[in-house]
Image (cartoon, rainbow, N blue to C red):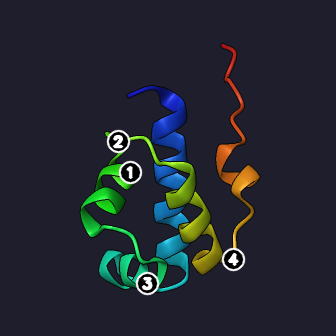
Amino acid sequence: MDERTRVVGRRIAAARTAQGLSQRELATRANVSIWLLRKVEQGVQGPTVAFLTAVCKVLALDERSLNAYQRRHY
């Protein structure tokens, strides 16, 4: 997967852990597959719009903040 996918996954994982939720708890509350949640957090599967909407609602996040991507220039 590309860097954007990995960044989104890391941001979801960080928000989830900051709120003290397990992957199972988040998946249940968002009504999404725990398998998909794990794959998205690992950066190996891109999230769907429906997935992002559900997860962001539970985590009280703005979807745009997850998709914000800043390319690093070295």
Q: Residue at x 64, y 75 (%)?
A: 57
> Mark 2 against mark 3, which lies toward the viewer?
2
Q: CA distance from mark 4 to mark 1?
A: 18 Å
Sequence-first disc among 2 and 3: 3
Question: Which amino acid type is marked by label 3?
Answer: Leu
Sequence-first disc among 1 and 2: 1
The residue that label 1 is drawn on is: 40
Q: CA distance from mark 1 to mark 2?
A: 5 Å
Question: Which amino acid type is marked by label 1?
Answer: Val
Q: Position of residue 54 (x, y in %)?
A: 56, 69
The residue that label 4 is drawn on is: 60
Secondary structure at badge 3 equals loop
Q: Is residue 40 or residue 20 the one in the foreground?
A: 40
Sequence-first disc among 3 and 1: 3
Extreme-top residue of the structure: 74
Q: CA distance from mark 3 to mark 1?
A: 16 Å
Sequence-first disc among 4 and 2: 2
Q: CA distance from mark 4 to mark 3?
A: 13 Å
Q: Residue at x 69, y 35 (%)?
A: 69
The residue that label 3 is drawn on is: 21
Q: Position of residue 20 (x, y in %)?
A: 47, 86
Secondary structure at badge 4 equals loop
**Above/below status of 6 relative to 59:** above
Question: Which amino acid type is marked by label 4?
Answer: Ala
**Above/below status of 49 relative to 32:** above
Q: Residue at x 37, y 42 (%)?
A: 43
The residue that label 2 is drawn on is: 45
Question: Which amino acid type is marked by label 2?
Answer: Gln
> Mark 4 against mark 3, which lies toward the viewer?
4
Numbered badge on residue 48: none
Q: CA distance from mark 2 to mark 3?
A: 21 Å
